[in-house]
Image (cartoon, helix red, strand yellow):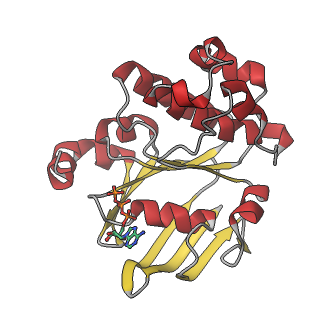
Amino acid sequence: MLEVRGLEAFYGDAQALHGVDLVVREGEVVTLVGRNGAGKTTLLRCLMGLHRDVRGSVTLDGTEITGLGPHQRARRGLGWVQDDRGIYASLSVEENLTLPPVTHPDGAWSLAQVYDAFPVLADRRRAPGTTLSGGEQQMLALARVLRTGARVLLLDEPSEGLAPVIVQRIRDIVQQVKANGTTVLLVEQNVRFASSVADRHYVLAEGHVAADLDNEEFTRRQDELLAYLGM
Ligand code: ATP
């Protein structure tokens, strides 16, 4: 459903992506792994239309979306959770959850579903965004995109810096959205987390795809990958 061909991205004269090719099929969970600076975040930003200095092609359900801006892509079903989480600090948890426009009503989570999946957000529904812990912010950011009904989730390091119990919760949610048929592409440096949720993995190195591994091979080569990623 999401297809990337020959994607190149630039920051001024510096080239960050050198012809990335990848495919994410409907209902798949796919990770992007790679060392710092490999181009993972840049790739997600290009997919969401947030980075405009690009060449190459991105199609969603066979339709070219390369020239579209972030809002148009969101309307077509792409949902983005950025690594700095983008929470409105002055608004309460519930206000943050009520703001995102619903783009695909069929898959949009209700407030009740969100609070059921993330009881901690229910407990803190009146708390301002500023007072949330890192883990709570990560859950809120994910919950906000689930509220829109996005059909393809682009997640940037959802487990980064979180306590194991919260990583487990995020893993459950990824498995739940997959079971509902939602497609997920996530940047993930935590190899164990990646192998526990994903069907396939792309290893990015220096702005191109160095390997495309199914989860069985990825899991078998976990130690090698951990060493390669410097973990
Ligand atoms: P990390 O895990 O460290 O975030 P990454 O794989 O997500 O790494 P990117 O952040 O996409 O990598 O960076 C890819 C390349 O683009 C790197 O060489 C980085 O230095 C460069 N880069 C990223 N953001 C900018 C920017 N705003 N201006 C200039 N160069 C940038």
Q: Nearer the viewer, residue 178 or 113?
A: 113
**Foreground residue, 185 or 24?**
185
Q: Nearer the viewer, residue 25 or 72?
A: 72
The furthest residue to the bottom: 13
Q: Specify whether 30 is left or right of 165.
A: right
Which residue is drawn at the image coordinates 53% and 81% (left, top)?
A: 54
| Picture coordinates of residue 143, whole percent (x, y) | 64, 33
Q: Position of residue 38 (x, y in %)?
A: 32, 65
In this view, 140 is above or below 226:
above
Residue 175 can be seen in this image: no
Assign the N terminus to one quadrant of the image: bottom right
**Quadrant that contains the C terminus:** top left
| Residue at the extreme front | 90
Ligand 1 quarter of the rendering: bottom left
Residue 28, position in %: x, y?
A: 56, 48
Q: At 59% from the left edge and 66% from the top edge, which residue is drawn? A: 50
Residue ID at (72%, 25%): 94
Q: Which of the pair 190/126 is nearer the observer?
A: 126
Say left or right for 137 vs 72: left
Q: Based on the displayed image, in which of its 4 quarters is residue 207 positioned?
A: bottom left
Q: Is residue 109 left or right of residue 186?
A: right
Residue 27 appears at what percent x and percent y? 62, 46
In this orientation, does residue 74 appear?
yes
Looking at the image, residue 175 lies above or below residue 213: above
- Which residue shows up at 61% across the image and 62% down it? 48
Q: Is residue 58 above or below residue 142?
A: below
Above or below, 146 against 189 in this view is above
Q: How many marks?
A: 0
Quarter holding residue 195: top left
